[in-house]
Amino acid sequence: MIRKIKIKYIYMAFAILGVGAIAFLVQPRSLTVSIPSLATSPTTNSEVEPIKKAIVHIAGAIEHPGVYEVTPSIRVMEALKLAGGTLPDANLDGVNLAAKVKDGQRILVPVRKPDRVKPNKSKERVPSTYIEAQVPVPQGYPVAINSASKEALMTIPGIGTTVAQRILNTRAGHLFDSIEDLKKIKGISAKKLEKIRPFITL
């Protein structure tokens, strides 16, 4: 009787151990996975390179022309300021001030050419009074056309026998009121009257 009880307890002990072993085997285990870090140390390729400089030659109508070391991204107008600015006679119409400078570039600021004064080719008419003042009148002149004889009228340069007689015929009816009345006589044009004007009077 006692032996049977011992055997029963032994079976029970083995059963408990077996259940424990099975429970241990089927129990989920935590797995540790090593995930590499995404953060990597900077390499030499990712290092910031030093800013390169551009060498430019600024010449022409500039305050301080010469060779300058500038940043390649600046504009031409900024480069000109570094050289002291332009001179008063600088012609900026031929310079692209908004362009970016390049290494080895020559920036030339031309000088504005002075305005040429065009000669006045128009012929100004010389007043008759000026002509009269320039023509020397010899002795015996001027001849009074309202009282001179035919011979005296013929001494006037350009007045011959025929024209002198026409002057006498015209004044016989009415004396001349002005020198301009001589243009009414055939043979005395306005141009001819200007030539003889210094030699005549009323």
Image: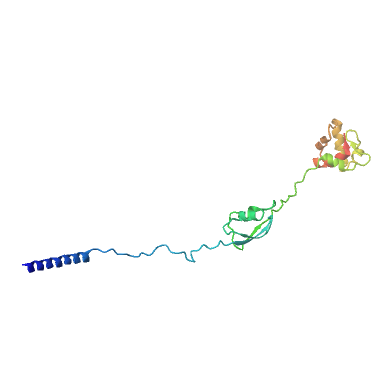
Q: Nearer the viewer, residue 6 or 58?
A: 6
> In the shown orientation, is residue 39 left or right of residue 24?
right
Residue 156: quarter of image: top right
Q: Nearer the viewer, residue 101 or 153?
A: 101
Point 85% across, 39% down: residue: 197
Q: Nearer the viewer, residue 179 or 167?
A: 179
In the rendered view, tell whether residue 143 sits above or below residue 28.
above
Q: Quadrant of the N terminus?
A: bottom left
Q: Is residue 16 visible?
A: yes
Residue 181: quarter of image: top right
In the rendered view, tell whether residue 165 sits above or below residue 93.
above
Residue at the limit of the structure toward the right, as seen here: 139
Q: Residue 100's x, y, as percent?
A: 58, 57
Q: Residue 84's x, y, as percent?
A: 67, 54
Q: Quadrant of the C terminus?
A: top right
> In the shown orientation, is residue 79 left or right of residue 16?
right
Q: Residue 154's x, y, as percent?
A: 90, 40
Point 15% across, 66% down: residue: 13
**Image colouring:** rainbow
Q: Nearer the viewer, residue 88 or 113?
A: 88
In the rendered view, tell whether residue 130 sits above or below residue 5.
above
> In the shown orientation, is residue 10 left or right of residue 174?
left
